[in-house]
Image: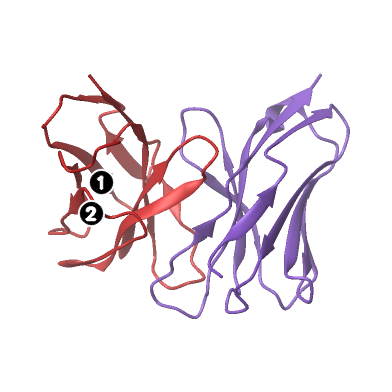
Chain colours: A red, B purple
């Protein structure tokens, strides 16, 4: 079945440590997105990519980095510069274009040790 | 201008009742309005979507009502069932844009009492 796979499901970060969240899709979608979800705040866009080797900052990009070397993969690194990283992180993809629905993975919950 | 305001934050409805969630927006460039449903520990999934050229769209028990002049839209769940208990997000997007950025509301946690 086609879909989006996020791993790991749970992740713990130590102080000063960078951690990378994986997102893989086999839907042949051009566009991919990373969102952060905090209670009562909905989904906030971190980074998005419309095509391989290109990506743009979203609304809350500070303290995060991404790469898009392959169409299927869009990993997110939470750097030590992100002082409040505890959240539920969601990856999504779409065919591209404003009218296309976004398909989401089941998320990674990141916590601080 | 970029916000989508959603209410209520939480909602409790008896089984068989009608659940209503409301959203409002400011940016007149928005022309695609999807609703997403999210169960605990899962990612959101597209439930139903509407374009502003129609005032209502129905899919099964789920209906979107759209008021372009008031810049408001709402989700109605008829004959609400316990399986509908989830968090619902409204969203908006300037569909003409190739960036396909979606602005999400803050979510409504819906509980259906048996």
Using a 10 Å C-alpha cutoff, classify the residue at mark 2 as few (fewer than 14 neighbours), some (14 to 19) or many (20 or more): some
Which residue is labeled 1 in the image? A24
| Residue ID at (48%, 62%) | B102
Secondary structure category for the residue under label 1: strand
Describe residue A60's horizontal placement relative to residue B96 as left or right: left
Which residue is labeled 2 in the image? A72
Residue A58, disc: none
Q: How many marks?
A: 2
The N terminus of chain A - image quarter? top left
From this view, report whether residue A55 is shown above or below residue B61: below
From this view, report whether residue B68 is shown above or below residue B82: below
Q: Position of residue B28 (x, y in %)?
A: 63, 78
| Residue ID at (64%, 55%) | B5
Q: Is residue B59 visible?
A: no
Describe residue A73's horizontal placement relative to residue B81 as left or right: left
Secondary structure category for the residue under label 2: loop
| Residue ID at (81%, 34%) | B80
> Of label 2 and label 1, which has the lower sequence position?
1
Describe residue A68's horizontal placement relative to residue A50 as left or right: left
Q: Is residue B4 visible?
A: yes
Marks 2 & 1, CB-CB < 8 Å contact: yes
From this view, report whether residue A90 is shown above or below residue B112: below
Q: Position of residue B114 (x, y in %)?
A: 81, 19
In three-dimensional space, the C-alpha distance between marks 2 and 1, rounded to whole angstroms, equals 5 Å
| Residue ID at (44%, 78%) | B97
From this view, report whether residue B52 is shown above or below residue A87: below
Using a 10 Å C-alpha cutoff, classify the residue at mark 1 as few (fewer than 14 neighbours), some (14 to 19) or many (20 or more): many
């Amino acid at each position: 079945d086609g879909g989006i796979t996020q791993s790991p499901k749970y992740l713990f970060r130590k102080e000063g440590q960078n951690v990378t969240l994986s997102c893989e899709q086999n839907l042949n979608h051009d566009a991919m997105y990373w969102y952060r979800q905090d209670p009562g705040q909905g989904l906030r866009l971190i980074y998005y990519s419309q095509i391989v080797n290109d990506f743009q900052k979203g609304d809350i990009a500070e303290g995060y980095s991404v790469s898009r070397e392959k169409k299927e993969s869009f990993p997110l690194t939470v750097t030590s510069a992100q002082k409040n990283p505890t959240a539920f992180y969601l990856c999504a993809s779409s065919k591209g274009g404003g009218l296309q629905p976004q398909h989401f993975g089941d998320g990674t919950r990141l916590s601080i040790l | 201008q970029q916000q989508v305001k959603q209410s209520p934050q939480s909602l409790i409805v008896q089984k068989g009742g009608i659940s209503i969630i409301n959203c409002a927006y400011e940016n007149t460039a928005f022309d695609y309005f999807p609703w997403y449903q999210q169960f605990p520990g899962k990612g959101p999934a597209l439930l139903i979507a509407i374009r502003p050229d129609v005032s209502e769209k129905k899919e099964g028990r789920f209906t979107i009502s759209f008021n372009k002049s008031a810049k408001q839209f709402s989700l109605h769940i008829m004959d609400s069932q316990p399986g509908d208990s989830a968090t619902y997000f409204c969203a908006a997007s300037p569909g003409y844009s190739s960036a396909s950025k979606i602005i999400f509301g803050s979510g409504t946690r819906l509980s259906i009492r048996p």
